[in-house]
Each structure stands twice: as C-alpha cells, then as structure tokens.
Image (cartoon, coloured by chain):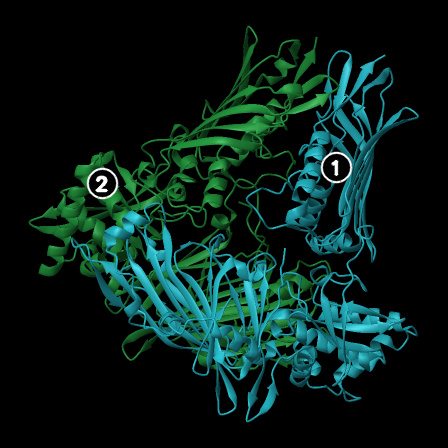
Chain colours: A cyan, B green
C-alpha cells in the first residue's frame, strides 16, 4: 500500500533541476505562497457558485498550506501558513461557524489570524464582507486526554448562510525544526484548489518522502528564487474521507508527504538536524535525562520489596511489570514538554499515573534497580506507516515502552496496556520497529515480533442432545493469549449482574433464546475458561420423520466482507484462531440423512476448515478459522471475501436426521 | 420505582448550632468517624456526599455560596479511570476554596496542590469548566475533596439529583437562607421529606441528611433517571416584603409573555416586516398552511444557536436577521412576533424531558420549565418546537409528550396582554401516528442462492423522524448510501442492495407525508440448504427484534417507551415448482396485551395460500407509551412473540 521513492533534494540536485525551469514561474510561485487572502478571492457571484456546485453541501474552494524554513543568524525558523476558503451551499451552515485552531505550547504557536466571511447581499447578486471580531484563547480539555496542555484560538464566523464563503488565513510557528512535517492530501468535502508548498533556504537540506502516493500523483514543481528553494504539490485527485475523520489514525492508507530537515550549512559548516537515526537518537537521549535512583528512595524500596525473594531474571521482570501495570494508571497525557520528555520516575510513582513515556521510564528504572538490563524504547504504534530507517524523525514514533534483554533476546514491555500478560508484546506495537536506548551513544533497532495465531485462540466445544426441538448440552469455552487478556479486561467488574450478563453474551449460541443456568469461570495468566450448560429452545426444525439442525451455532466473522468502496484493509488486533467443536448425540431411532460437504480454504495469511464426522452415534462438527496476518491488504481483498462467502454458505447449511 | 433504602439521620450536626460561614469550611468540619466498607463493595462507593447552598444578604443583594464535598472509596482500577478528572464548576462561577486529598490504604494522606486546578474549554460540553486531577490514586485508596464557589443565587427551583450509579453511604443536603427567606423543598422517590431547623437566630435552615442510598436501579423499557431519588427546593416566602408563593406559575407566565412580546423598535418592526415578506414569497411557491410555511422557511434559513439566553446577537430581531441565528429566547421572540404578524393565535407550553425528569404539577418551580413549545389552536392544537430544526408542527420530540406541562395562554384586554397559566397533561401521539410498514416479495434463485427480495417500506411519525431530517443533508456518497441502505437491508444485513429509491426524504414533510423506500436486495442468507430441501428463514425478514427472554426480578418501574407505534409486515413468496411448503401453521401467532379492558398491544401473524403464492401478514402495535408495572409479563409476552417470529422458518421440501 505504500510507495517510498526517496526524493532527497539536496542543493546540487535542485540547481540542476532549476536550470530547466522557466524563470517566468517565479511570480506565479510567489503569488501562490505569499499573496494576501483578499486579493486571491474567486470573483464569482453568489448565483454562479450556487449553480456550479448545486449538488454539493460544502466546497473547499481553496486549501493551501505552505511550510517555510528559513535561516536567520544561524538558526532555523519554521512556520506553516494556512489559507482556506470554504463555500457553504446548504441553508444552515451554522455548525461550521465555530473554528478552533489548536496548538501545543511550547512546541507551536499560532499567529496572524485573518478570518472573515463573505455573505450574499440581500436581493443583490454580490458578496459583502464580515470580519470575525473576537478571537478567544482557550485551553482545550476532554474526557479522553489528561491535562493536555493543548491551547486553541477560537472564533465564530458571523452570519453564515447559504452561499456564504469563509476565509481563513493563519500562521503556525513550529518552534523546533525537528518537529516538521507532514501533509495529508485528503479532504472531507469536494475541493477545487488544493496545494501544498515547501520553501527553504538553499543552505538547508530537506528530505521528502511519499506515503500511499507517488510524485506522479501530483502536479509537482520545484523552483528557486534568490536563496529560496520552493517545492509545490498540487494533487491530481483528492480522496474524500468521512467528515471529522481523525487523519492521524489512518495514515497507513491516506496519501501524504513527510518531510524533515536533514541539516543546514552556516558559515561553511554543516549543522546536523536530523541527518539520520543517529541524530534523532542523540536528540531524544538529550531530552531524557538519566534518572539516578537513590538507594533509600520510594522506588528502590518498592522494587526491593517486590523482588527480594525472586531469584530469576524473568521472575523479577514479571513481578515488576505486573506491579507497574496494576498500580500506575495510563493516561493520554500531553502537557507541553512532558510529551517529549518524561518526568522523573519518583514523581510518576507518587502521582500514580503517567503517559507512555512516564510509565516506561518508571518501569525501566525499577527493572534497572533490580539489576536487569532494561532500556527506554521509542516506538511508533501500528497506525503510523513509518520506519526509523526511512524516516528518522519524531513523526516515526508516538509511544514509549521498555525493553529488557534476557536470555539473549529483547522482550518488549508495555505496562500501559491493562491486562496484558507478561511477556507478550502489546498488540498495537507488534511488527513495528523499536528504537532501544542502550546508552548515550548506542542504540539498537529491533522489530517487535507479531504473536502467532496459535497463541491467541478462541475455542468453544459443546456436546448436546435434542430434547423436543431444543438443543440441550454442556460446553467449554476458552480464550488464550491476547484473547484471554481482552476477556480479563471485559470481565473486570465487581458487579455480579454485569458479570453474569457479560458471560451470558459469550455463552449464547444458536439464538438469543439460548439460556444457561450455570457457568464456571477460571482465569489463569494465559487462559480464561468458561464451563457452562445451555439450552437453545425451539432450535431444531422437526417434521414427522426428519430433524433439521444447523450445527453452526455461531456465524463467526460472517460480517467481515470487505466492501468495494472501502479501500482500507481489515486491521486485526493480533493474529488469532477461532475454533468450534460441536458434537450432537444422534437421537435414538434416527440416522444421518444429509451432511454438508467439507470446506477448506488455504491462503498464506488466512484460512478455514469446516468438516463433519460421524463417531459412535454422534455427529461432530469442527470449524477452524486461522488469521495469520495483522491486516488484510487491498490486494488480498478478493481472496478474503471468497473465504467469507464460502463460510457464509457453510453457515447456511443444515444437517438432516431421518427417522430410521 | 424501587425506593432507595434509607435510614434518616435525624440529628442536626453541631455545625449549625451557630451561624455557619462556608468560607471557614475545612477538613475539621468534615471530620467524621471512619466508615467500614465490605470487601465486595461496588466499583467505587461514595462514602460521603455533601451539598450545601448558603444564601446570604450581601449588602442588600441576595448572594449564594455553593459548597460541595465528596469522599469516595476507590474499589477497582476502573474507578481510577472514572475519577481521574473531577469537574467542579463552570468557569463563570468563581472558585473560592478548593481542597483535595488522597488517603492511601495504609492511611497516608497526600494533599492535592491547588496548582492542579485548571480551567479548560471542554469540547464535548462546549463550555469552559474548572477541574482538577487526583494524584496518587490507587486501588483501595479514598479520595476526598471539597470546593466552594460563588454562584448566581437561583432561588426559583434547584433540582438536586441524590441517587447515583454507585451507592452513597452518607448523604447531606443543607440549604441556609437569610431569616426573611423561607425555603421549601420536596423529595421524589424517597421516603423522607426535608427537615427544618429553627434554632438558628439569623438563618433558616432546611436539610436532608440520609444514610445508605442504594445505587440507581435500571430496568429495560424504563427511564431510570426520571425516577431516581432527588430533591427540589425553592424560595416560598419573603417575610420582609410579605410575599408568599414567590414561585408562582402565574407570575412566570406574565414574565414570559412580557419578555417575548416586548415592544419592538422601528428598525426591528421593519426587519420583522422584511422577514414576513420573505415568508409570504416562500408561501406562494410552497403548498401547506401559513404556520407550516413559517416554520419551514425559518428553520430552512435560520439556525438555532446554543448560547446563553441573553446573548444579544441571538435575541434581537435585527441581529437574528443579519446573523441568521437565534438562541432559545431569540427563537421564541422571532416565532412569537412572526405568528402574531400573521394573526395566528398561539400558546406557550413549558415542560420537561420525561426520560430525565417528570413534570410535577403539584410543586411549582422553575426546575420543571425545561423546554418551551408553541401550541397552535388553529392547527388542531398541534405543537411546534422552534429551536429544533429536525422537528415540525405536529411532531415534537416525543419525550416532551405524555407529561404534564405549564400551558401559558395570552389574552388582550384593553390593548394589554394578559397571561394565564395552567398545568395540564400533554397527550402522546397514538400508535397510528408512527407506522413502520414493510412489504417483502421473495423470488428464489437457483438452489436458493442469490434470491431476490423486492422491498417496499413506508415509515411515518417518529419512525420516519430518524431519517427524514437527515436524508437531504447527507451528500457524501458512501455515507448517504449507508443511511439509505439501512432502510431496507433489515431484511438481510449481509445482503447486497441492488437498487433503491426514496420518496419524501425531507424535513419539511415530517408529519405530512410518510417516507417511502423501494429497493431490491440480493440475498444468500434467507435460505438454509438441507440436502435438497430448504429451510426458509421467513422470520428473519422482519429484521432483528427486541427481546425480553431473561426473566427478571420483580418489576419495579412502569413500562415506559418513547412513543406508541405500529408495525405492519407483509411477506410473499411462490412455492417453487417441485417443492411443497411445510410448517406454515407455526406462523400463526397471536399475543395480546389488555390494558383498561381493551387490546392495547398485540403481535399477530397469519398466512394465506392461494395457488402457489404464500402471503404472510404480521401486525404489531403498542397503543400506550406507559403501562403499569403489573402488566409487565403481558407486555413481555408480546415483545417476545415478535422476537420468536424472527426465528420462524418454513420448510420447502423437495417432492
């Protein structure tokens, strides 16, 4: 899904390229980037807009963003200018009136907001301009994120109505050039004019990478003017995404460009910024002071009390991991530099909560205190499509874990995930590169392993008889690996009614009339088991001399057909297996009349088997679905859909018992 | 409603033996003996919840200080998540005092720094709030905090919800007021009423001190929030001015009418005329009554803005006209003046959302004046909600019906407008108002795969209201397709919608024309292959049904649903050549709910067979929105009859 033709435009490349570009382009570039908003208004009348876009609700007439990286007195100054012109074509566009521009001090700030709207004048086919009068400074908070430190400039466009056009221009100052940059080329609305440009001083070297797109997907130009190099991308096609989609969550599939400042030269000397992973690592390491744990500190006391009786390294690691996981609450926590630099582990211990960096730093400190080889580790979660080798930039990661080196291998510990069993890697980092901080000069890149499907099994076996039209029997269901962890999280309630109801939802099979008057729940580190009895009233279809029973008491994954219009692949939390093993006691006086054909589908990444067998007066039905990859890609969609279709066909098949 | 188990705490705290100053409140005031909690306690237990309203005379002005004190036992890790951020007040209220601490399981006390108090704009709530976060929380610890704020002195009705999702071990509500202001309160779903303490020299004191309040109880098809334990209090008398019944609905009616009918200045009158002209012009192009055209025009061209009711831009006719927006007050001002300019008589109705709070006609307070509606006598007394763009005349949010309301009528006497107020019951809409009619014709494919389902569905009333206001707004193809297909793919959620057409999918037709949908669904999932025979899942075509199979403990709440409704289903298929149909008689079902000697709810299904054509007809209806709890078993039988029908199959046996 991703194409990464590396386009590293160093100064020499640029100079060669610029020879072939007409100097006449210069005014055009300057116009596109630096023009004042009012001067660039599309000059159509309200009636013309209404006619042109009569089938639309909102149209982005213009969506420009421009990043400039300048060199002043040996320092890099980075800013992003945004310019947006939006046409509203429904009668009550009030919901769009409130504009919130978020920023995160001290990393970024917002300046030079110019916002107004043009309202169709009553009875005249012209526009009149109304300025936004008040811009408020807000601290943003939510239930989901803790002490965010997000700030926002907030204002309302006045008098929005059908045919109105809002205009917004502002500048975002990025206070550290290492934090640029990414441009995603998707929009929720029809977009007429979309452009991204990047300009920088010729003494600066920039690296540009394409994700889910290639340079051929753009009208792309590069040009120089004086000491400034400018790239300009105009997408040939713009993919529409649902309104209010958080693009950060879908970077694996959305077309975008990632760029970074590699280095710059000043007074003949090359000043490195993010040339490679070494630069990134050393910058990260500076942000993360080494915390020395005093012998009599709370951290050392707690750690010692936890492991004093445990001789093995694995045992110590497990005890400490479990303690941190249980006692330190993970909260998404973005408060200024805490997002890039963790606080002291002693403080985390006292606060009893923290973000991933806080928790990993505490865990690393405790493991280190217990004389284990533990290291802070940066990692990007699975919703980021980058690797450190391709993109050595802070864009490549968004999370921290702890790695320990035991028995000649690294184990990746994420104590933020509730109910994760030691030493499994958490699902959201599996398959990702981890940047392990060994010391101030040394680091290691390791890929977090993906767990095998055999590890996480959802298994249900049942033995049942026919009583009148009901199926009556007993069953055993268990979940292992990550599935067991998920179950532990689900069943983590002290409310018995709630627990009964949750367990019932896992026992229910055949129909929602299924009843159970008893279960036995067992929870072990890698396994959650349920033994139960059940009755499914009115399940069998019975005639004078035949009984029909659909042995598929659960239609697992039946609704996972991937639609044509949904290009996003199916994302599995982890590899897993689903196994069903149901045995029917054939009633006395009956023989088996019809048994469906077996089904077997094999694919490198997934597969299924469904088969029936007759044994000692019983009919056994076994179903196994094996999902061996974390996602089903677009290319595999047809094969996947064929499997689901075949399974659904199998689910709609019944056995027949005939009176002998 | 199951009453909370209560033990009243009759003695009055020594706190009130002298004039109480909330500014001096501290942990010492809050001290009390430790409460033992059993190991199997809930996720978290509210050990103490104290709410204190302190009304006082501040140099001739009535002022209010609000004190809230809470102590909670954290009895699970998920409780830590719930309690990580505590919202205290809106930023407009000034925070005077804040103290918080965590008591660890081993008794260590950690005080929370006042620096933890922050102000932020809460995106979901849409307002600035003051909040803080706890540090050092761990399983088994107790968190405790209190804060004091200066607030606007509302005295016309404060609604205090007592019962919560978690049990409360000790609850205290105290209201202190200057000696001349007599406060009265009423409790709901509680066995106990307010007590008063007359020992204070310069203050009146009413209070409710309770022990052991159970967690809120939930039952299906009910509105637990509306029936949870609560207290409402208000000022009743001012001894200085010798005014009694200060909160009177007559006075409220008078104030409302005067406020909404204030005389407009010349410029406003001109603007009003302009809007009127636009409506006249709109009416010339659209059919329907004047009232409907007024509502359609305004709701199509102006928007409701959820802002403070005094915000000038949204209550002044000129500003409304230029900004195309109005808030609640502005909406009623606009509609009132426009209706009056067309000589259309109207009344106002104030009521509550009955899923949250039932209007009590016996206790006049502002707490029951939650939402205002407009009633149009010339349109058969139909109701209109000016501020909800998704409703139209004759169709307002069903939660405002089947509830008492304050009816405000105005009369002109000698050119003066006189308002009168009466509380009356607002009737809900009958089941015939909300009809969901589904017609499915099955054509079988080879081997009963790729079957074709011709679907016709007609929705009216509240069933249509889930779609009509939105269909015209959604333009994004994939989302639009999803919404449209959801109208017919109830017959087979995994089926493929081959074609679909929709009529009357617009907000302006709500309550006037039903939403009509026709389409074709290709389905592989309605037939089970059984070795040449076929089990036709005929019941699945009516879509998934609510079920109440689980036998419950004794029903304690009445059965309450949002609206009365009717479902009509017709399914037809031809028996394929070479097959015969079996099991049709099992489709004959009849379950009824008798209420007040008539059939008030029913599920009935039957079939006919003519030549090879089998036609199955299903009727299900519930005439009332509320049934007594004693009828729960009968109600359940009808609901489950529909859920059972959903599982019915017909055998097509190869001859």
Tell me: A659 left or right of B97. Answer: right
Q: Position of residue A88 (x, y in %)?
A: 33, 54
**Residues at discs 1 and 2 both on one chain:** no
Residue A246 visible in the displayed image = no
Q: Position of residue A237 (x, y in %)?
A: 47, 54
Mark 1 element type: loop
Q: Position of residue B524 (x, y in %)?
A: 63, 28
Residue B569 is marked as none
Question: Observer-nearest residue: A168 or B204?
Answer: A168
Tell me: B87 left or right of A443. Answer: left
Question: Observer-nearest residue: B86 or B258?
Answer: B86
Residue at (28% x, 69% y) in the render: A39
Vertical relation: B1 (above or below) B262: above
Callout 1 environment at 10 Å: few (<14), some (14 to 19), or many (20+)?
some
Mark 2 element type: helix
Residue B338 visible in the displayed image = yes
Residue at (35% x, 67% y) in the render: A168
Callout 2 environment at 10 Å: few (<14), some (14 to 19), or many (20+)?
many
Q: Chain of mark 1?
A: A
User: Which residue in the rendered view is the most extreme toward the top?
Assistant: B611
Residue at (42% x, 46% y) in the render: B354
Residue B293 is marked as 2
The residues bearing labels 1 and 2 have C-alpha atoms spaced at a distance of 57 Å
Question: Observer-nearest residue: B162 or A513?
Answer: A513
Q: Position of residue B593 (x, y in %)?
A: 51, 25
Residue topped by disc 1: A516
Q: Chain of mark 2?
A: B
User: Which residue in the rendered view is the most extreme toward the front?
Assistant: A20
Vertical relation: B629 (above or below) A145: above
Tell me: B148 left or right of B63. Answer: right
Pointers 1 and 2 in contact (C-beta within 8 Å): no
User: Which residue in the rendered view is the most extreme toward the left?
Assistant: B414
């Amino acid at each position: 899904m991703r194409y990464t033709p590396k386009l590293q435009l160093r100064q020499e490349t640029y100079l060669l390229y610029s020879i072939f570009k007409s100097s006449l382009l210069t005014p055009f570039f300057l116009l596109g980037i630096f023009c004042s908003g009012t001067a660039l208004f599309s000059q159509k009348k309200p009636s013309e807009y209404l006619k042109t876009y009569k089938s639309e609700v909102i149209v982005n007439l213009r969506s420009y963003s421009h990043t400039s990286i300048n060199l002043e007195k040996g320092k890099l100054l980075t800013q992003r200018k945004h310019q947006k012109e939006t046409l509203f074509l429904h009668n009550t566009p009030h919901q769009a009136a409130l504009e919130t521009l978020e920023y995160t001090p001290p990393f970024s700030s917002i300046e030079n907001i110019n916002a107004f709207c043009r309202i169709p004048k009553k009875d005249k086919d012209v526009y009149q301009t109304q300025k936004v009068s008040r811009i408020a400074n807000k601290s943003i908070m939510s239930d989901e994120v803790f002490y965010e430190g997000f700030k926002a400039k907030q204002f309302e466009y006045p008098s929005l109505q059908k045919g109105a056009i809002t205009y917004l221009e502002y500048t975002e100052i990025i206070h550290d050039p290492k934090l640029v940059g990414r441009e995603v080329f998707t929009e929720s609305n029809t977009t007429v004019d979309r452009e991204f440009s990047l300009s920088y001083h010729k003494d600066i070297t920039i690296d540009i990478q394409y994700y889910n797109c290639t340079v051929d997907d753009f009208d792309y130009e590069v040009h120089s003017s004086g000491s400034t190099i400018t790239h300009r991308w105009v997408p040939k096609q713009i993919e529409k995404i649902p309104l209010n989609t958080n693009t950060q969550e879908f970077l694996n599939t959305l077309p975008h460009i990632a760029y970074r400042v590699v280095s710059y030269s000043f007074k003949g000397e090359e000043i490195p910024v993010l040339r490679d992973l070494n630069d990134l690592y050393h910058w990260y390491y500076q942000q993360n002071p080494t915390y020395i744990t005093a012998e009599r500190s709370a951290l050392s006391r707690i750690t010692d009390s936890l492991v004093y009786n445990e001789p093995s390294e694995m045992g110590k690691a497990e005890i400490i991991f479990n303690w941190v996981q249980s006692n330190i609450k993970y909260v998404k926590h973005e408060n200024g530099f805490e997002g890039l630099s963790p606080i002291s582990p002693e403080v985390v211990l006292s606060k009893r909560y923290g973000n991933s960096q806080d928790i990993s730093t505490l865990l690393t400190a405790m493991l280190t205190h217990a004389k284990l080889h533990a290291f802070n580790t940066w990692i990007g979660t699975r919703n980021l499509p980058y690797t450190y080798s391709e993109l050595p930039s802070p864009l490549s990661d968004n999370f921290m874990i702890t790695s320990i080196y035991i028995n000649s291998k690294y184990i990746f510990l994420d104590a933020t995930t509730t109910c994760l069993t030691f030493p499994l890697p958490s699902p959201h980092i599996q398959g990702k590169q981890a940047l392990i901080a060994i010391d101030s000069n040394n680091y290691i890149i390791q890929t977090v392993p993906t767990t095998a499907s055999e590890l996480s099994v959802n298994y249900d076996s049942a033995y049942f008889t026919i009583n009148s039209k009901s199926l009556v029997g007993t069953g055993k269901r268990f979940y292992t690996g990550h599935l067991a962890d998920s179950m532990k999280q689900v069943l983590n309630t002290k409310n018995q009614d709630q627990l009964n109801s949750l367990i019932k939802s896992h026992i229910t099979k055949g129909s929602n009339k299924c009843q159970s008057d008893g279960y036995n729940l067992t929870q072990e580190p890698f396994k959650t088991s349920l033994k139960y009895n059940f009755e499914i009233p009115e399940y069998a279809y019975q005639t004078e001399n035949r009984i029909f029973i659909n042995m598929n008491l659960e239609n697992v994954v039946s609704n996972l057909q991937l639609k044509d219009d949904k290009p996003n692949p199916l994302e599995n939390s982890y590899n897993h297996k689903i196994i069903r093993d149901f045995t029917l006691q054939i009633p006395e006086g009956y023989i088996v009349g019809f048994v469906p054909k077996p089904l077997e589908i094999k694919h490198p990444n997934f597969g299924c088997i469904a088969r029936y067998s007759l044994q000692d007066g019983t009919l056994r039905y076994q179903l196994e679905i094996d999902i061996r990859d974390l996602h089903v890609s677009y290319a595999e969609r047809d094969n996947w859909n064929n499997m689901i279709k075949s399974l659904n066909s199998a689910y709609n098949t019944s056995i027949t018992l005939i009176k002998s | 409603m199951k009453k909370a188990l209560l033990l009243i705490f009759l003695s009055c705290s020594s706190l009130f033996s002298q004039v109480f100053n909330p500014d001096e409140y501290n942990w010492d005031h809050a001290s009390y003996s430790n409460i033992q909690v059993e190991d199997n306690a809930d996720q978290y237990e509210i050990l103490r919840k104290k709410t204190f309203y302190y009304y006082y005379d501040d140099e001739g002005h009535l002022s209010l200080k609000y004190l809230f004190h809470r102590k909670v036992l954290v009895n699970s890790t998920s409780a830590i998540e719930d309690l990580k951020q505590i919202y205290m007040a809106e930023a407009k209220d000034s925070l005077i005092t804040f103290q918080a601490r965590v008591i660890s399981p081993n008794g260590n006390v950690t005080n929370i720094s006042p620096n933890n108090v922050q102000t932020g704009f809460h995106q979901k709530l849409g307002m600035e709030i003051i909040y803080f976060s706890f540090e050092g929380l761990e399983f088994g610890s107790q968190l405790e905090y209190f804060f004091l704020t200066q607030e606007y002195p509302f005295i016309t009705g404060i609604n205090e919800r007592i019962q919560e999702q978690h049990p409360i071990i000790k609850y205290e509500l105290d209201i202190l007021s200057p000696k001349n202001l007599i406060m009265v309160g009423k409790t709901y779903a509680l066995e106990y009423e307010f007590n008063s303490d007359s020992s204070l020299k310069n203050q009146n004191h009413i209070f409710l001190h309770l022990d052991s309040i159970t967690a809120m109880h939930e039952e299906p098809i009910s509105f637990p929030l509306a029936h949870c334990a609560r207290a409402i209090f208000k000022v009743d008398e001012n001894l200085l001015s010798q005014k009694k019944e200060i909160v009177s609905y007559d006075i409220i009616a008078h104030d409302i009418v005067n406020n909404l009918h204030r005389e407009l200045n010349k410029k406003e009158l001109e603007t009003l005329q302009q809007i009127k002209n636009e409506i006249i012009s709109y009416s010339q192009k659209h059919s329907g009554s004047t009232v409907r055209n007024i509502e359609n025009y305004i709701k199509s061209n102006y928007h409701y803005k959820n802002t403070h009711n005094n915000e000038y831009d949204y209550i002044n006719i000129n500003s409304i006209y230029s900004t195309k927006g109005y808030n609640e007050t502005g909406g009623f001002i606009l509609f009132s003046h426009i209706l009056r300019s067309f000589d259309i008589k109207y009344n106002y109705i104030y009521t509550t959302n009955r899923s949250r709070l039932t209007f009590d006609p016996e206790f006049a307070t502002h707490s029951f004046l939650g939402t205002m509606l407009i009633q149009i006598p010339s349109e058969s007394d139909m109701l209109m909600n000016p501020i909800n763009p998704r409703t139209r005349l004759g169709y307002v949010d069903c939660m405002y019906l089947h509830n008492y309301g304050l009816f405000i009528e105005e009369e002109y006497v000698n050119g003066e407008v006189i308002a009168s107020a009466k509380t009356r019951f607002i009737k809900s809409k009958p089941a015939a108002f909300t009809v969901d009619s589904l017609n499915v014709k099955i054509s079988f494919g080879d081997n009963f795969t790729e079957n074709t389902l011709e679907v016709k569905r007609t929705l009216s009333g509240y069933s249509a209201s889930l779609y009509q206001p939105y269909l015209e707004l959604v333009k994004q193809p994939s989302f639009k397709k999803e919404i449209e297909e959801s109208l017919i793919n109830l017959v087979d959620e995994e089926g493929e919608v081959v074609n679909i057409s929709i009529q009357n999918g617009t907000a302006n037709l709500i309550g006037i024309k039903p939403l009509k949908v026709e389409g074709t669904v290709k389905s592989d999932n309605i037939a089970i292959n059984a070795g040449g025979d076929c089990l036709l899942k005929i019941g699945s075509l009516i879509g998934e049904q609510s079920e109440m199979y689980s036998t419950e403990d004794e029903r304690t709440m009445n059965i309450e649903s949002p609206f009365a409704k009717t479902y009509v289903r017709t399914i037809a298929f031809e028996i394929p050549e070479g097959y015969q149909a079996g099991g049709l008689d099992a489709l004959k079902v009849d379950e009824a709910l008798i209420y007040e000697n008539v059939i008030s709810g029913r599920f009935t299904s039957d079939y006919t067979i003519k030549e090879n054509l089998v036609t199955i007809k299903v009727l299900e209806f519930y005439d009332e929105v509320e049934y007594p709890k004693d009828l729960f078993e009968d109600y359940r039988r009808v609901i489950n009859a529909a859920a059972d029908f959903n599982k019915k199959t017909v055998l097509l046996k190869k001859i």
